Every structure is written in C-alpha cells, then in structure tokens.
Image: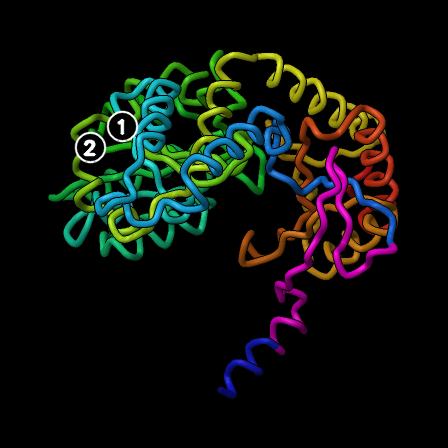
Amino acid sequence: MARLSQWLDERRRSGSLRELRPVERLGNGRIRLANHPDSPPLLDFSSNDYLALSEHPSLIESGQQALAEFGAGSGAARLMSGDLTVHHRLEEAVADLKNKEAALLFGSGFMANAGVIPALVGRGDSVYIDRLDHASIYDGCQLSGAKLHRFRHNDLAHLEELLQKNPSTGETLAVVESVYSMDGDRCPLLDLVALKKRYNFTLLVDEAHATGLFGPNGGGLVEAEGVGEDVDLVMGTFGKALGSYGAYLAGSQEMIDYLINRARSFIYSTALPPSVVAASLKAVELVRESSQLRDDLWQRVDMFKKLLREGGLEADLGQTQIVPITVGASDRALQMAEALQKRGIFATAVRPPTVPENTARLRFSVTRHLDEAQLAEGAESLLAVVKEFAPELLG
C-alpha cells in the first residue's frame, strides 16, 4: 500500500518514528543493546520495575514452582477451563490490598481499560477523562460509543464546568490516573472525590504507576489519600512496581460479577499463565509485608532529584518516581537520548503522539535497581547533556 511508505517517511522526517531496540537484561539495573554485544552495559533509567521485584528471588521461586506444577499456560479462557485456584487467590489478595469486595484479572492494563470502560458506558452515556490519560483509556472510551469529554490536565474546575454544561440523561463515568506516567505528577484525588459527591458520577482510577509505591500497605494513592470508599473502581497493573505481568480491576462484588459477563477483553481472552499469576501473588504479599521496599525507593528518588537541583536543573521534576525532562522538539529529545547512551545511560526519548506536540522529553524513572553511585552517575550525565543541548533548563 502506497500510503504505508508515505506515512513512514513522514514519521522519519518529523523524528517521531517508533522503532524497536532489543536489549539484554544484565541484572541490577543494567542492560545492553542486543545488536551491540561488544558495547558496555548501560544503566537503565527507563524501566517501570520501580521496586526491582522482577528480579526478587521470592517472585522467581514462586513462578518456577507454579510453572512446574501447572505448566506453561492456563489452556483456556477462564469461563472455559482456564479458571485456576491461583487466579482466585490473586484476586482475593488484590481486593484486600485495595480494600474492595472483589477483583478481576485481565491480560494487561490495556485490556483492562479497553474492556471495562465499554462495559460500563455506551451510547447515551457520558465519560469524562483527563487530557493526559493513557491511550488505553482513550481507546476504551472510543469503543464504548459514549460521549467523550476531555478536561484539562488535573484541572477539576474545568471538569466541573464540563459537567455543568453537559448534563447526562444516562450514566456518567470519570476516568483518571492517580500517577501520570509521562509527567510524574499526581491526581488531586481528595478534590476529585468531593466533586464526585456533588455530581454523582462513577469514578474509575487507574493506579498502574502507584500500586505498591504509596500507602501504608502499598495500596496506591487511593489508599494513601484515604479515598478508597469513594472510588468506585480501581484498576492497576502487575507489570510495574509489582514486577510481573497482567492487570486487575477492583470494586464491589456486584461490579465484578457484572464485568465477568460484560467485559469482552476478559471473556474472550486466555487466562494469565499460572507462573505469572503466582509471581504477582508473591509481589502483592511482599509490598504488604515490607514498607522498607518503598522507603528504599523514595530515598533514591529524593537523592536523584536533589543532585539534579544542586546541579542547577530548574525543570519540573515531577512529584513521584517518574522524572520528566521536557525539551520540546522531538529531534532534540532524540539527540539527548543518544548522547546519554554514549555516556552509559539508557533513557527513552518520549515523543508525540505519546505526549502532546512540542513537549518531547526524556523520561527518567528511578528504581531500586540503581544504587547511590549509579544514580549519581545518571544525574551527572544528564546535567552534562542538558548543558549541551538544552541549557535554558539550567539556572
């Protein structure tokens, strides 16, 4: 098809063409580009494995035991013969972590949002989302057929204005993320819940980048802010701080019973492999048992940001473990990522359409994989590259 070549050429010229780069994981926060076997290791500042649980011996052992006991796959969708006891054990653990009656597993965060939202709203209904919500939330809204309203990022006054201007005769759903993955900022959940009580809409909070990291039990920002009873639905993933794979939706038992019958991405998908589920179950247990995991991470986050500020960086460094360095043009972000790689640092250049136009950035994420010396090396390298390519970010 001629349009394919034209589209790809346009992307190349604009600096927004995405390409896969296979890497080898060397452990302890280090990777190597697979196509360059003789190159030195790189420090990985792009991982979402925030608590370093993907390499935790307990998760590995649990996964291996389940693999030996149950085999490599579940064999079917859960409504067929793929519904294993271990799936229910993980759902019970997640419901307990999120202080909800029940939970339901999905194959991925994308599948959860793309399945849950169309199950909740449809034609004649309204859905309100933050402009910076994840692509899976957008796609779920498009699939639903509900009328879509987007409010300015974290601007609840704008959300209220839209609610007032667009009264719905059907169901009304609002969907936000508690931690935004490209900006590293937090949703004002307390104020959002207050708004929910005034306008009586259903609230779905995506905690993909918060679960395991916030709250006394690692239950996320919903737990940390004490709004669990007022948030109707909590979605999250196992593939980030929990170090495994898959996703969940937690809510009332009635809601879960409904989704089992209506969420197409659940009904028509093979169940998660038991080895993956067992590793996730162990991860949930660990984050509940050990606040030290979170303490270790936040000490690293504070140190990294302190080094950047002491080095003169005046950019907004976010409120969480995600540290965005916004530089504007896509080509500049790519040049900076390449310069960092030459210094031994792997940090992804994030470009439109993943982020809005003219807000291309380097997305640094701090993980427990990286020790103090490695974080210092990363900060020093970043400051040097900023000085060369984006000196306006320095004081």
In the foreground, 15 or 55: 55
Amino acid at the residue labelled 2: Met
As drawn, the label of residue 251 is 1
**Rendering colour mode:** rainbow
Residue topped by disc 2: 255
**Left or right: residue 226 compared with residue 300:** left
**Rendered view: 223 above or below 351:** above
Quadrant containing the C terminus in the rendered view: top right
The 10 Å Cα crowd at callout 2, few under 14, some 14 to 19, many 20 or more, is some
Magenta stretch bounds: 9-38
As helix, strand or loop, the secondary structure at mark 1 comes to strand
**Rendered view: 50 above or below 140:** above
Q: Position of residue 376 (x, y in %)?
A: 84, 29
The 10 Å Cα crowd at callout 1, few under 14, some 14 to 19, many 20 or more, is many
Residue at image coords 41%, 46%: 73
As helix, strand or loop, the secondary structure at mark 2 comes to helix
Residue at image coords 20%, 29%: 200
Q: Position of residue 146 (x, y in %)?
A: 22, 52
In the foreground, 23 or 167: 23
Let me know if residue 19 is in the magenta part: yes
What whole-number distance in Å separates the C-alpha atoms at marks 1 and 2? Answer: 6 Å
Using the rendered image of the protein, determine whether residue 113 is visible from the camera's viewpoint. Answer: no
In the foreground, 268 or 316: 268
Q: Are marks 1 and 2 in contact (CB under 8 Å)?
A: yes
Q: Position of residue 223 (x, y in %)?
A: 41, 17
Amino acid at the residue labelled 1: Gly
